[in-house]
Image (spheres, rainbow, N blue to C red):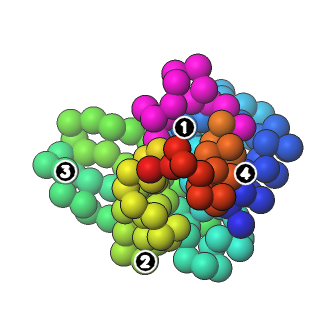
Amino acid sequence: MLLEVLQRVEADGRPFSLESWVWVSPNLHECGTVCCAVGWAAQDRRMNKEGLHLVRHSTDASGKIVGNRWISVTDLPKAAAGQHWGPEGTYVIMPAFLEAIGFDAVEAFFGISRDQACWLFASYRYPRENATKIGEVIERVQAMMAGGEDVP
């Protein structure tokens, strides 16, 4: 399913970046949304039926979690308005599965290790110039599915 989602995102020319799970801003693109591989996957109805979805993750100034609110794709622009990181706390849109969020959710949903999750989806694991190229992520997903030697 993930490979199909990513190939559809690539074919449709949807905005892609590994720099954030989901970023919503009318200034970014005509649709106003830029997502990473997991951000796009978490908006796919088939993935939603399997339990992967997006939440608005909120913390207070000490980093204590104060809320994780499930959001639908249609609620995304409204829920993401004003995403911020600051001394008073944060709230960002993140993937979730069961009780896990972020990379914990990625590991649990796809049944992979943290190292594998980061190798596939973390921007720092790609050459800087490739961090916004979905084709690079597709190649890694295909390598993992094939059990390639370079896969962690």
Q: Which mark is residue 98?
A: 2
User: Is residue 129 rendered magenta in the image?
Assistant: yes
Nearer the observer, disc 3 or disc 2?
2
User: Which residue type carries mark 2?
Assistant: Leu
**Tag 3, which secondary structure?**
loop
The answer to whether the residues at label 2 and label 1 have Cβ atoms under 8 Å apart is: no
- Residue under numbered circle 4: 6
Mark 1 vs 3, N-terminal side: 1
- Residue for point 21% across, 36% down: 87
Q: Would you name the residue on which mark 1 appears?
A: 18
Compared with 96, 24 (above or below) is above
Residue plotted at (52% across, 24% down):
127
Q: Which mark is residue 63?
A: 3
- Left/right placement of residue 25 relative to residue 102 reads right
* Residue at (79, 42) in percent of width and height: 10
Distance between the alpha carbons at the discs numbered 4 and 2: 23 Å
104 left or right of 132? left
Q: Is tag 2's residue or tag 1's residue first in the polypeptide sequence?
A: 1
Residue type of the residue flagged with mark 3: Gly
Badges 1 and 3: C-beta atoms under 8 Å apart?
A: no
Local packing at callout 1 (Cα closer than 10 Å; few below 14, some 14-19, many 20+) is: many
Q: Earlier in the sequence, mark 4 or mark 3?
A: 4
Question: Observer-nearest residue: 105 or 143?
Answer: 143
Callout 4, which amino acid? Answer: Leu
